[in-house]
Amino acid sequence: SESDDITLTDAAAESQAAHITQALKLTPFSRVLPAVAAAALRGGDTQPLHSLCETIDLLPTELMVVSDDQRVISTSRAAKCFAVYFAKQLPGTPQRIPSSFTIRSLAGVQDSIEDLNGVTFRSPNTEIFTKYGVSVT
């Protein structure tokens, strides 16, 4: 039936997202959204983020979304999530949009997390001074 096809598609999408998460060696608390959910975010639907928050037992204000898509960033902000804009170095790509953070490489994700939490995943001798005024040694 048609609903079975949708279920299989959703299961395949979940499997693909899990594979991407593993292939990128993301931490266990990281999630890659299935294509259907990502498309909904691009369309302005915040429900996939709220569902994800419920699944992983976080508030939207505790979730960080990383994307190079302006629409996803806008939707993430509307959902009250931290929105990290990955500004690609391509002609015509905006280098800044309204977001919680703007990064130019994936290393910037770590910097964003450290900035929010005031802790570092680097050597114990590293000091971090964040825009929130937190200094950790």
Image: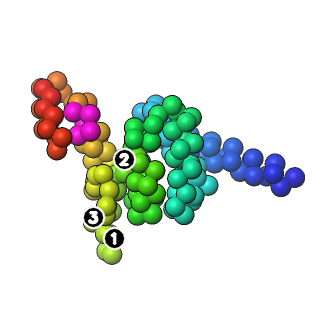
- Of tags 2 and 3, which is closer to the observer? 2
Callout 2–callout 3 Cβ contact below 8 Å: no
Q: Residue at x 56, y 35 (%)?
A: 55
Tell me what residue is drawn at x 41 percent, y 46 percent: 81
Prevailing secondary structure of the magenta residues? helix
Badge 1: few (under 14), some or many (20 or more) residues near its Cα, within 10 Å?
few
Q: Amino acid at mark 1?
A: Thr
Q: Position of residue 63 (x, y in %)?
A: 42, 41
Circle 1 residue: 93
Figure check: 135 above or below 76: above
| Disc 2 residue type (three-letter) | Phe
Q: Marks 2 and 3, how far apart in space?
A: 15 Å
Work out whether residue 89 can be spotted: no
Lower sequence index among marks 1 and 2: 2
What residue would you read off at disc 2? 82
Q: Which residue is mark 3?
A: 96
Q: Residue at x 51, y 31 (%)?
A: 57
| Position of residue 96 measured from the top left corner of the image (x, y, whole percent) | 27, 64
The front one of 136 and 88 is 136
Relative to 8, 61 lies left or right: left
Q: Is residue 12 visible?
A: yes
Q: Callout 3, which amino acid?
A: Arg
Whether residue 128 is in magenta: the answer is no
The magenta region covers 114-118
Is residue 115 magenta-colored? yes
